[in-house]
Amino acid sequence: MLGPDHPETLRSSRDLARAYRAVGRLNAALALSTGTLADYERVLGPVHPDTLTARLNLASAYREMGRLDEAIALVTRTLADRERVLGPDHPNTFSARLNLADTYQAMGRLDESIALLTGTLAHSSEPWASTTRTLSPLATALRSPTGWLADWRRPLICTPASSTTGSGCSVRNTRTLG
């Protein structure tokens, strides 16, 4: 027996809460996520990487339940902690940025979501940042009726941060299709 405070036991609880969310058992997910986060904070401390992951899981449960103000508060706090503890280009920090962008989208704050995602693409020095993990939520926000690309004829052009021709993403007002 590993015991209730063993990191593997905590990880199993965190994963079970995520599974509850995946099958729509949101109340069970919220209850387990809340308890698991409290256990992580008590056992590993408030800024341990596993604690920060548990906090994002709780934020995701809040978001899926429509409790967006609570979700945004947790995600914002977690992103700040991950940037401070892990650094701005760590994959877990990147994940927190995507979570924040998703929460902005759920709140209808598309401009903030787009700015966060394009900033992530423009400023990351890591090649994995320009993957579909960033591009897919960005495309979703941009295709929104109120997003930057409500007009399909304006493509988003992104260049890597290390490019000699510049960096960042911009919308070109050129026609791409007939």
Image (tube, rainbow, N blue to C red):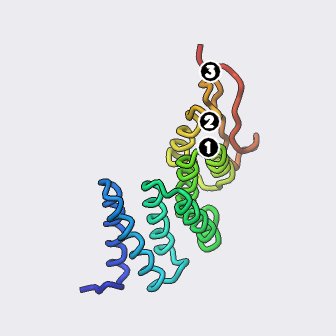
Residue under numbered circle 3: 176
Could you tell me the amino acid type at mark 3?
Answer: Thr
Say if mark 1 contacts mark 2, CB within 8 Å: yes
Instruction: Tell me whether the residue at label 3 lies in contact with that at label 1, contact meaning CB atoms closer than 8 angstroms.
Output: no
The crowd level at tag 1 (other Cα within 10 Å; few <14, some 14-19, many 20+) is many
Residue projecting furthest to the right: 165
For the N terminus, give its image quadrant.
bottom left
Q: Which residue is mark 1?
A: 110
Task: Tell me: residue 101, above or below residue 171.
Answer: below
Q: Residue 60 location in percent, x, y?
A: 46, 59
Give the tally of numbered discs: 3
Identify the residue at image location x=56%, y=33%: 143
Between label 2 and label 3, give the one nearer the viewer: 2
Indicate whether 8 appears above or below 99.
Answer: below
Q: x, y (%) of residue 70?
A: 53, 63
Which residue in the protein does label 2 denote?
147
Q: CA distance from mark 2 to mark 3?
A: 18 Å
First reached walking from the N terminus: tag 1 or tag 2: 1
Check disc 3: other Cα within 10 Å, few if <14, some if 14-19, many if 20+: few
Q: Is residue 17 above or below residue 174?
A: below
What element does badge 2 sit on? loop
Looking at the image, which is closer to me, 170 or 26?
26
Which three-letter amino acid code belongs to the residue tagged 2? Answer: Gly
C-alpha separation, residue under disc 3 versus residue under disc 1: 24 Å
The residue type indicated by label 1 comes to Leu
Q: Residue at x 44, y 75 (%)?
A: 37
Q: Seen in the image, is 30 located left or right of residue 127?
A: left
Label 2 neighbourhood size at 10 Å, few (<14), some (14-19), many (20+)?
Answer: some
Q: Quadrant of residue 108?
A: top right
Figure quadrant of residue 147: top right
Q: Is residue 109 left or right of residue 24?
A: right
